[in-house]
Image (tube, grey):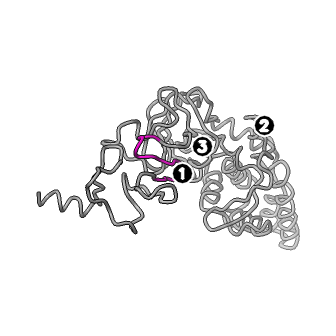
Amino acid sequence: MIFSLVFAACFNDERAYPFGMGLIGRQKSPANYRYGFNSQEKETEITDTDSHYSAEYWMYDSRLGRRWNIDPVKKQHESSYATFANNPIFLVDPLGADTININNQGVISGITPAAGNHLLFDHRGSQIQFNDPEYDTQLINDRGIKVGDKLVTYLSTKETTDLVDGQSKVNSKKAAYYLNLFNPAAGLAAHITSLFGIAKKSYNEWDFSHSVLGTMVNANLNHNLGNTIVSEGRTYIDDYTYEQYYFFVFGNAKKAYNLGDAGNFMWGMAGQRSGFTWIELKAGSNLNELRQGRGFDSDADQRAIEDGFDFKRK
């Protein structure tokens, strides 16, 4: 008895049936306490009976043991209204996320419930990390997936290198390095020319998510033109959020990049192969974001650029 009382006090025991509906006549948590069954936030705007809850990606009715919005992640083996894989005793699902398995072609072979952000595993059972887990989970849920969908495009080291080199280099940058050894004035001129060169390329050939990768997956890059995005404290207008759902894995790395981050990866690689330093690329990317009113780069953007910069060293 004493153990039960301590357990209830520590874990906010809702005195509930397995799917969270309260037991009639049993004491529940204080009315001003926001959270209830399965650590979910209560939705008192619908009823005042502590029967409805909300997670980041689902809305839930504990009286039915079902969500009352459709799961955007489609599962052939399960109802789109199911929660906790119909097993609330063993499974906690705070966000409504899933584990996604893909085959060696990047096609989804299975989807099972998981807590937190989506988890991705390849055909060997090895986990592939998402470069931007929270945002990528949002992208997948917004788009909706099912077994048989192609989620990931694999590009070998050679394929990645050929695609980057196929968009040509900024030759004046490497020229600046050698000219500086003999003629500093000419080297400075070449360096300034290289900055204009990378700026021009970044809106043309080096806009890899548009010029290369988007065409590979038939993405409509202007699908959400004018959509307002809030990410990491930044608010800006994004023109292809919906289409970033496509993911890429480069070489033997165990990391998946959404379409936008994959473009940043290849941009960082292209800059390194043209002779730019990591400091120059980092500063240039941040200046571009500031120029467009987006604030500084997100951590995920910077990670993708740095990964691309280091790609040939791995």
Q: Which residue is painted at 88% across and 64% down in the image?
A: 193
Q: CA distance from mark 3 to mark 2?
A: 20 Å
Q: CA distance from mark 1 to mark 2?
A: 24 Å
Q: Which residue extends farthest front?
A: 25
In the displayed structure, 63 sits above or below 286; it is: above
Q: Which mark is residue 215?
A: 2
In the displayed structure, 148 sits above or below 135; it is: above
Which stretch did the figure color magenta? 53-66
Image marks 1 and 2: residues in contact by CB distance under 8 Å: no
Q: Which sits earlier in the primary sequence, circle 1 or circle 2?
A: 1
**Disc 3 designates what residue?**
140
Name the kind of residue labelled 2 in the image: Thr
Residue 94 spot, x, y in % from top left: 43, 51
Residue 31 spot, x, y in % from top left: 38, 66
Between 273 and 95, the one lying in front of the other is: 95
Between 291 and 222, the one lying in front of the other is: 222
* Secondary structure at numbered mark 1: helix
**Disc 1 designates what residue?**
133
Query: Is residue 71 located in the magenta-colored stretch of the structure?
Result: no
Name the kind of residue labelled 1 in the image: Pro
Judged by depth in the image, the label closer to the viewer, 3 or 2, is 3
- On screen, residue 137 versus residue 266, left or right, reads left
Q: Residues within 10 Å of mark 2 (few under 14, many from 20)?
A: few
Query: Is residue 60 located in the magenta-colored stretch of the structure?
Result: yes
Image marks 3 and 2: residues in contact by CB distance under 8 Å: no
Q: Which sits earlier in the primary sequence, circle 3 or circle 2?
A: 3
In the displayed structure, 96 sits above or below 236; it is: above
- On screen, residue 159 versus residue 50, left or right, reads right
